Image (cartoon, rainbow, N blue to C red):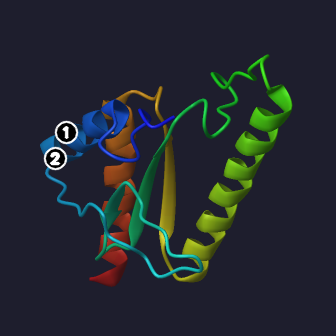
Amino acid sequence: MRANRKRDTGPELRLRRQLHRLGLRYRLGRRIATTPPVVPDVVFPRAKVAVFVDGCFWHGCPIHGVQPKVNSFYWFAKISMNKRRDQAVDENLIGLGWRAIRIWEHEDPREAAARVKSIVRSYAAIDA
């Protein structure tokens, strides 16, 4: 489990590369003061947009998420807890006026970046 990275994963790096190509500038490692505090994968502070790149296994992707056969009770509880935490984080962010975007690791980075760009631009336009 130590080999699983918390940040700078392949899907996250591919998304960040596409966001940069689209001219979007973002922050990394930016803590948002929810209860408990959360650190999204990519943050657009002015537009108040937080982007999370979720792994299919760890976050229970409906398409690619698999249920392990060994120690299945443990893994079912762990993945269910992750899904509940993700939902609570999204609700906390919305309560603070933020927009949370969840991107699955299997999504095409170009399409995901285009979706993020349209949301960031629409929220940035509201503040202007």
Q: Position of residue 74 (x, y in %)?
A: 79, 36
- Would you place residue 64 above or below residue 81 in this image? above
In the drawing, what numbered circle is on residue 17? 1
- Would you place residue 65 above or below residue 77 in this image? above
Q: Quadrant of residue 9?
A: top left
Q: Extreme right residue here?
A: 73
| Secondary structure beneath label 2 | helix
Decide if residue 63 is on the left or right side of residue 29.
Answer: right
Q: Position of residue 116 (x, y in %)?
A: 37, 51
Instruction: Give the residue at x 38% y 73%.
Output: 31
- Would you place residue 97 above or below residue 12 in this image? below
In the drawing, what numbered circle is on residue 49? none
Decide if residue 96 is on the left or right side of residue 6.
Answer: right
Q: Are marks 2 and 1 in contact (CB under 8 Å)?
A: yes
Disc 2 residue type?
His
Question: Between residues 105 and 47, which one lies in front from this camera angle?
Answer: 105
Q: Quadrant of residue 113?
A: top left
Q: Position of residue 87 (x, y in %)?
A: 68, 59
Q: CA distance from mark 2 to mark 1?
A: 5 Å
In the drawing, what numbered circle is on residue 20? 2
Question: Between residues 17 and 81, which one lies in front from this camera angle?
Answer: 81
Decide if residue 81 is on the left or right side of residue 19.
Answer: right
Decide if residue 30 is on the left or right side of residue 73.
Answer: left
Disc 1 residue type?
Arg
| Secondary structure beneath label 1 | helix
Q: Position of residue 94 (x, y in %)?
A: 58, 74
Quadrant location, the C terminus: bottom left
Instruction: Give the residue at x 45% y 29%.
Output: 107
